Image (cartoon, rainbow, N blue to C red):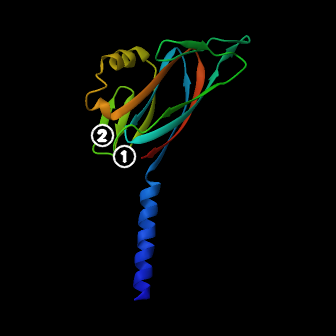
């Protein structure tokens, strides 16, 4: 009888570890960008996401021609001597998963893939689509999206970690 209880306890422990470990997700992207490139970071409402972004500009004759443009229109020119690093945190904003599935230009989110990063070389298509979406209506109300544009030549390294909460 003790062996049966021990086996049951072991099964419960293994099952709980599998459930907890499957709640964590990661993403990674290391991309060379040139011209005007949009980086799109998205997540399902039930997920929490933290992303670290490192932009290393291409340097010609001691000069950098790389500019970072944020969604609100502000921009910063990245100096030739440094990496430009910043973090983006997209907190959990909704209930546990029901059924989330959105696959469109720059966004690929589902219950099994709750965090995503995409690099789009034709940034105007995404920006036009982004501005025309009703973000308060389903299915887009079930996700969060952050994006920025890199103009010029640079290496963009993105590391992200998310969890279902």
Kindly state the secondary structure of the residue where label 1 is placed: loop
Point out the image quarter for the N terminus.
bottom left
Residue at x 40%, y 14% (from the top left corner): 124
Classify 140 as above or below 23.
Answer: above
Q: Distance between the Cα atoms at labels 2 and 1? A: 9 Å
Classify 57 as above or below 50.
Answer: above
Query: Quick one: 160 or 155, which is closer to the camera?
Result: 160
Classify 15 as above or below 91.
Answer: below
Mark 2 or 1: the one toward you: 2
| Mark closest to the chain's N terminus, 2 or 1 | 2
* Rendered location of residue 16, percent (x, y): 43, 63
Query: Quick one: 99 or 128, which is closer to the camera?
Result: 99
Q: Which residue does the numbered mark 1 point to in the structure image? A: 112
Kindly state the secondary structure of the residue where label 2 is placed: loop
Residue at x 41%, y 70% (from the top left corner): 12
Q: Which residue does the numbered mark 2 point to in the structure image? A: 100
Q: Residues within 10 Å of mark 1 (few under 14, many from 20)?
A: few
* Rendered location of residue 21, percent (x, y): 47, 55
Disc 2 vs disc 1: Cβ atoms closer than 8 Å? Answer: no
Quarter of the view holding residue 64: top right
Q: Is residue 41 left or right of residue 130?
A: right
């Amino acid at each position: 009888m003790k062996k049966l209880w021990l086996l049951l306890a072991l099964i419960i422990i293994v099952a709980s570890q599998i459930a907890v470990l499957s709640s964590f997700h990661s993403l990674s992207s290391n991309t060379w960008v040139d011209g005007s490139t949009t980086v799109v970071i998205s997540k399902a409402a039930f997920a929490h996401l933290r992303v670290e972004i490192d932009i290393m500009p291409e340097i010609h004759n001691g000069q950098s021609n790389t500019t970072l443009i944020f969604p609100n229109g502000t921009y910063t020119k990245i100096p030739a001597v440094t990496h430009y690093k910043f973090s983006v945190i997209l907190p959990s904003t909704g209930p546990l998963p029901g059924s989330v599935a959105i696959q469109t230009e720059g966004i690929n989110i589902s219950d099994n893939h709750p965090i995503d990063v995409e690099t789009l070389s034709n940034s105007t298509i995404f920006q036009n689509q982004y501005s025309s979406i009703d973000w308060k209506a389903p299915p887009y109300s079930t996700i969060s999206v952050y994006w920025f544009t890199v103009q010029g030549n640079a290496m963009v390294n993105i590391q992200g970690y998310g969890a279902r909460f």
